[in-house]
Image: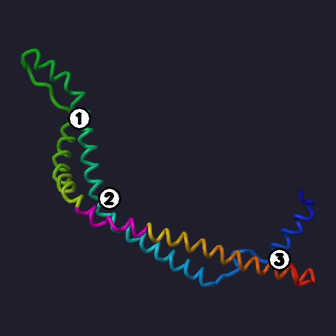
Amino acid sequence: MLDPSAQSSARDQLTAAGSATDAVPNSPTRDALRRVVAKLEAASFELDEAQKPARRLSATVAEFEAAERNLLSFVGRQAPPLAAWLAEGATGPRPERAAATLDAERLIAQLNRDSAAARVALPAVQRVRKPWPNACARCTASADETAYWTAADAARVFAQRWRAKLVTRSGTSDVS
């Protein structure tokens, strides 16, 4: 275990030598990383834009399906009185449906047309947007590789600066 004062001294020397982030601010690898990140941002934006129509169509279908479930819950609660009325011979006034059930039926009628159109259009819209995730994946892989090489370049420059500081402080040039 190193002496704490030696650790502190090494940390101070490391700080004096400069951090890895400012080792190579305008290196070719950092420039390449900036370009790749810009391409990734552009591809991500284009992917998001390409997915908007599919998300809207899917939301229309989901809204219809939720309205259907809502209507079924209303109908389920109103079924027992109607069944009892039918079992007794359907004499007397028919049990009235609740206003909420009538509203749910009107909503279903409206959403049914929209949902049917969305279901028909959705496969074509999904085919159009299919290449974008692959483009984003390629940009991400390229960004990862470029980030690796940028970090390696920065580490190399930092090590060279650190070595130069050690050589200067020790007064000898045979430090390996």
Give the left or right position of residue 148, taking residue 48 as reference: right
Which element type, helix, strand or loop, lies under badge 2?
helix
Q: Position of residue 67 (x, y in %)?
A: 25, 43
Amino acid type assigned to the residue bearing label 1 in the image: Leu
Give the image quarter of residue 131.
Answer: bottom left
Q: Nearer the viewer, mark 2 or mark 3?
A: 3
Q: Main secondary structure of the magenta part?
A: helix
Give the image quarter of residue 32.
Answer: bottom right
Callout 1: few (<14), some (14-19), or many (20+) C-alpha neighbours within 10 Å? some
Which element type, helix, strand or loop, lies under badge 1?
helix
Which residue has dot 2 on it?
A: 55
Which residue has dot 3 on it?
A: 16
The answer to which of marks 3 and 1 sits earlier in the sequence is 3
Task: Identify the residue at image location x=10%, y=15%.
Answer: 88
Q: Gap between marks 1 and 2, in whole Å?
A: 26 Å
Q: Gap between marks 3 and 1, in whole Å?
A: 72 Å
Q: Is residue 16 above or below residue 131?
A: below
Give the colouring mode of the picture. rainbow
Q: Position of residue 20 (x, y in %)?
A: 71, 74
Callout 2: few (<14), some (14-19), or many (20+) C-alpha neighbours within 10 Å? some
Question: Depth check: 77 or 97 in front?
Answer: 77
Amino acid type assigned to the residue bearing label 2 in the image: Arg
Q: Gap between marks 2 and 3, in whole Å?
A: 53 Å
Amino acid type assigned to the residue bearing label 3 in the image: Ala
Callout 3: few (<14), some (14-19), or many (20+) C-alpha neighbours within 10 Å? few
Q: Is residue 78 above or below residue 24?
A: above
The answer to which of marks 2 and 3 sits earlier in the sequence is 3
Q: Quadrant of the C terminus?
A: bottom right
Magenta-colored stretch includes residue 134? yes
Q: Nearer the viewer, mark 1 or mark 2?
A: 2
Tag 1 near tag 2, CB within 8 Å: no
Which residue has dot 1 on it?
A: 72
